[in-house]
Image: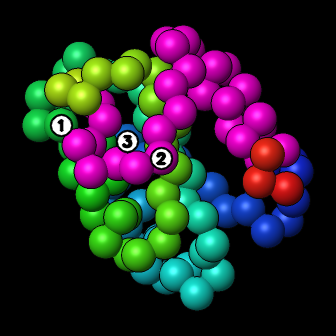
Amino acid sequence: MLDKSPNIAYVDYEPHSRNYAIETVKKMFDEIDVIVVAAEFNRNDKDHGDKKLLNKLREFGKPVVMISTVPYEEFLISEEMENVIVSYGLMRESLKAVSEFLYIIIL
């Protein structure tokens, strides 16, 4: 999506940098219209950190769209998420393809 417009910001997050992602959203709050989160299932994420991150992002009051690799609520998707697109692909390329498609739809 970054190559589509200069009005798109990107924050890559890993389990150890979720707080950084939240702080970045706080700093850019006035510039954000929609938050898109691409999340892939990680068996090692025992604390369901992506679910917690999504819930924190929802607290900002901006629309949040989640692109997930799996459709399972118990693994990745927060129960409160209203906008979820499932790629059913386990590779980052599938998340990228859905992101690009989503950009076209929003335009």
Residue at (85% x, 56% y) in the render: 107
Residue named by callout 3? 14
Q: Distance between the residues labelled 2 and 3?
A: 22 Å
Q: What element carries label 2?
A: loop
Of the pair 82 and 47, the residue shown nearer to us: 82
Q: How far apart are marks 3 and 1 (CA)?
A: 12 Å
The reply to whether residue 16 is in sight is no
Residue at (27% x, 51% y) in the render: 80
Q: Position of residue 50 (x, y in %)?
A: 29, 42
Q: Distance between the residues labelled 1 and 2?
A: 19 Å
Residue at (61% x, 75% y) in the render: 32
**Above or below, comparing residue 62 to residue 1 in the picture:** below
Residue named by callout 2? 83
Q: Label 3: how many residues lie within 10 Å, few (<14), some (14-19) or many (20+)?
A: few
Q: Position of residue 105 (x, y in %)?
A: 79, 46
The reply to whether residue 76 is in sight is yes
Choose top left, top right, bottom left or bottom right for residue 56.
bottom left
Residue named by callout 1? 48
Residue 30 appears left or right of 3: left
Question: Farthest left residue?
Answer: 47
Q: Label 1: how many residues lie within 10 Å, few (<14), some (14-19) or many (20+)?
A: some
Question: Farthest bottom residue?
Answer: 30
The magenta stretch spans which residues? 76-104
* Kind of residue at disc 2: Asn
